[in-house]
Amino acid sequence: MTMDRQNSRRRSSDETSLEERELPMNTGSIQTAPADESTLIATYFDERIPIPQEEDGGRFGGFSFRKLWAFTGPGFLMSIAYLDPGNVQSDLQSGTVAQYRLLWVLMWATFLGLLMQRLAARIGVVTGKHLAEMCHRQYPKVPRILLWIMVEIAIIGSDMQEVIGTAIAIYLLSNKAIPLWGGVLITVVDTFTFLGLDKYGLRKLEIFFGILITTMAISFGYEYVVVAPDQGSVVEGLLVPWCSGCGNKELLQAVGVIGAIIMPHNLYLHSALVKSRDVDRRKPSAVREANYYFIIESIIALFVSFLINVFVVSVFAEGLYGKTNADVHEICSLVNNTHADVFPSNNQTVEADIYKGGVFLGCEFGIAAMYIWAIGILAAGQSSTMTGTYAGQFAMEGFLNLKWKRWQRVLLTRTVAILPAFFVAFYEQIDDMSRMNDLLNCLMSLQLPFALIPTIALSANRKLMGEFANSYASNIFSIFVSTVIIAVNIYFVMNYVTNLGITNVVFILAVSVYGILYLIFCAYLTIDMTLNMGNGGLILSRFPGLRSYFSADFDYEDLAELSE
């Protein structure tokens, strides 16, 4: 692989001077944005939310709820990725397969996700650029393009899950009147409609997202109250980090929970959303204050999403765990539910998905439970569709320096996502739509390293982050967390591919070649991350020919200082 240094981040003196005026120096000082604001790429709305200035000094003179409210928004939009239809399906499968015994996995996966979101948000606040823009600035051309491709795959995969979830919700709400393929087509129109809301202002759009999250909380909370899970078992599942009597099936489900919770494109999204607040980056105290309030908001937002996920797991742990298809079919037949045929009359344990889950709730707890479940799924699909569109916009503009109108971006990603979903919905059964969710979870698990590793690398670079760079202990912990997350996701993917049972030589060869290239790219990013964490400049100074191949960015003045 050849890389021309003129195509790297140092390829233009004009670009370098612009970036140097925007980014903090390694002394820890924060420098202002360039005077010509039109030269910047507008990746979030033109509106910037002002931060109130208080006489008591806010963060250091006392906690300010007014300031917290000003910073509230990005974290809740970020948390929607923890509530998309893919997550909901993973939750209900967790309850069906392992009852309450994997609730602690859900809790710690959410906590690990918070740690990664904190790093991504900090990059956006400190540098004034989001993660995709920083990757464009720091990485050479070939790795940069590969990172963009991987992020786009994750976004399209997530979008397909949202299309599937929305179509199933419409299918349930219409009581089969609108076929699955019709629901898929409706998602095209409604997405464009909702995206028009941003013209009414950033705050109103954030409030709309808040309404969707509230809808999910009420819908799944209603199911929790109606089903009435055993509270002692819920608490035990959260606090006891063990899965008694669990086997390979439960282990795979635990891995699936982790893979569904931590979404790769969400790190790119969060790092961009925080730019919507008017933070004076010339003042380290203002940057420190922004980091403080953003982490508080993220904690609150992810706690809300965690509670909603717990509702879903617990409902199906209580209601569907251990039941066979024949058991549920009999219940549905007694109440003349029109969806009863989804459960065949056999003694196999129910393999749950968001469609079967809704049907079961309607049969066991009344038809209202099914419709309320469908409303929650619809809210999950719509909200995550919109945030996924913004993530795609940020990725394209950041990695490629290419600005598209939002409707053009929606048309591209939604077309790619809808085509396979439409054909499956038109020609196959609804079970195939649900199984596609598992394939998409596998696909997005593969993309996770291409968001985690750059996030850790860039947030650890002292030249970029100044005094806000990760500490040594934070770097070690971040590496450990990312290693665990990536390892369990790779295990999940390998197991999924193995269970396909495909023995075709061409398929095996293709998977092997892709696996080798995948590991090589991950190894490159890991080496680059290590260089960003330590004296990468000193190391690269001994091999001048390698400097243009990595993102570690050190001037010779920095090398002299580091060598002392």
Image (tube, rainbow, N blue to C red):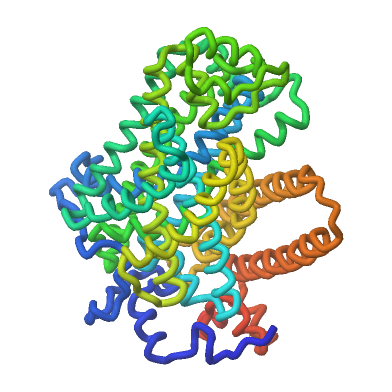
Up-down relation of residue 390 to residue 83 (above or below): below
**Vertical relation: 334 (above or below) 351:** above
* Residue 388: % across, % down: 42, 54
Question: Which residue is drawn at the image coordinates 34% and 72% (left, top)?
Answer: 404
Which image quarter: residue 562? bottom right
Horizontal arrangement in the rendering, residue 135 relative to residue 371 (left or right): right
Taking the image as shown, residue 502 lies to the left or right of residue 368, namely right
Q: In which quarter of the image is the N terminus?
A: bottom right
| Depicted 319 relative to depicted 303: above or below | above
**Residue 459 drawn at (x, y percent):** 49, 62
Which residue is drawn at the image coordinates 77% and 27% (left, top)?
247
Residue 523 in the image: above or below residue 303? below
Residue 99, located in which quarter of the rendered image?
top right
Instruction: Name the residue nearer the viewer: 302 or 83.
Output: 83
Quarter in which the C terminus is drawn = bottom right
| Residue 525 left/right relative to 389 | right
Task: Farthest residue to the top: give it.
Answer: 334
Which residue is found at the position 64% from the left and 67% from the top? 525
Q: Which of 503 and 317 is in front in this view?
A: 503
Residue 351 at what x, y percent from top left? Answer: 64, 27
Q: Is residue 162 something one can see in this rendering? A: no
Residue at horizontal 31 percent and vertical 61 percent from the top: 275
Residue 421: give x, y in percent of width and height. Answer: 52, 50
- Most extreme residue toward the left, as rendered? 55
